Image: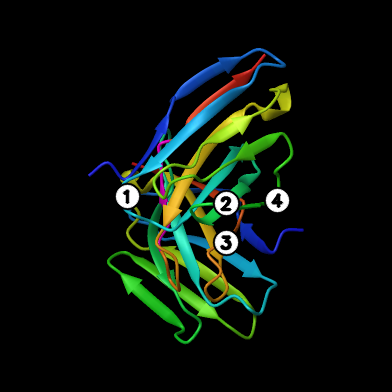
Amino acid sequence: QQQVKQSPQSLIVQKGGISIINCAYENTAFDYFPWYQQFPGKGPALLIAIRPDVSEKKEGRFTISFNKSAKQFSLHIMDSQPGDSATYFCAGGAGNNRKLIWGLGTSLAVNP
Amino acid sequence: NAGVTQTPKFQVLKTGQSMTLQCAQDMNHEYMSWYRQDPGMGLRLIHYSVGAGITDQGEVPNGYNVSRSTTEDFPLRLLSAAPSQTSVYFCASSQGGRETEAFFGQGTRLTVV
């Protein structure tokens, strides 16, 4: 069963626009929600992460918004750039359990 | 800094052959894991280890074996390769604990013909 549902599967955004990727989770024990970025031919790398005791976390152009009651969180990429073109994965983790449950990924293309 | 090193980067196997994918990390991380990545399927956990001598199954363990004799190394063995095992394989390591960052290798692209 898929415990973290990610949408959309693919996304095309114009340079300078806002990219929004959404994730919904089922396991209420999750207390750690990272986003990973993967470029073609590379392994995923941590982009930004949030814990459910805050509703928003911002790092540069990247922001995570978290809605605990709806069990949803999203990644916003402001002023999207062609260099942001990559696959983005959300995930959920619980406590000291280092097994992350992953979304299926979103392929983002930012047109110049 | 080497981080997580996977070898080989590419491999072609014939059905029924066996092979070992190597993974080594130099960060003294306790937790290591193997994933396979297939189009539209995201990252699926094959096996993981929480320390030397301790391994456990992930969601897709069939056809794969692992061992963890040292903290640094976590090889993945394909016992009898099948076309369904054609995939990109990633090894990852993390220190463990809350909010732990997983560091991934560059991946091994395996084709079974």
Residue B5, quarter of picture: top left
Residue to which mark 2 is pinned: B48
Q: Is residue A95 above or below residue A99?
A: below
User: Which numbered mark, 3 or 2, is in the foreground of this view?
Assistant: 2
Provide residue A112's location: percent of width, then percent of height.
33, 41
C-alpha span from label 3 to label 2: 8 Å
Q: Residue furthest right?
A: A1
C-alpha span from label 3 to label 4: 11 Å
Magenta part of the chain: B101-106
Q: Amino acid at mark 3?
A: Lys
Provide residue A67's location: percent of width, then percent of height.
56, 81
> Which type of secondary structure does the marked residue at label 3 adopt?
loop
Establish whether labels 3 and 2 are both on one chain.
no
Callout 3–callout 2 Cβ contact below 8 Å: yes
Q: Which mark is residue A99?
A: 3
Q: Amino acid at mark 1?
A: Gln
Callout 3–callout 4 Cβ contact below 8 Å: no
Q: Chain of mark 4?
A: B
Residue to which mark 1 is pinned: A81
Taking the spot 54% from the left edge, 72% from the top edge, the residue there is A73
User: Which numbered mark, 1 or 4, is in the foreground of this view?
Assistant: 4
Residue B79, quarter of picture: top right
User: Which numbered mark, 3 or 1, is in the foreground of this view?
Assistant: 3
Taking the spot 66% from the left edge, 52% from the top edge, the residue there is B58
Q: Which mark is residue B59?
A: 4
Provide residue A76's location: percent of width, then percent of height.
43, 65
> Which type of secondary structure does the marked residue at label 4 adopt?
loop
Q: Amino acid at mark 2?
A: Tyr
Residue density around tag 3, few if under 14, some if 14–19, many if 20 or more, within 10 Å? some
Establish whether labels 3 and 1 are both on one chain.
yes
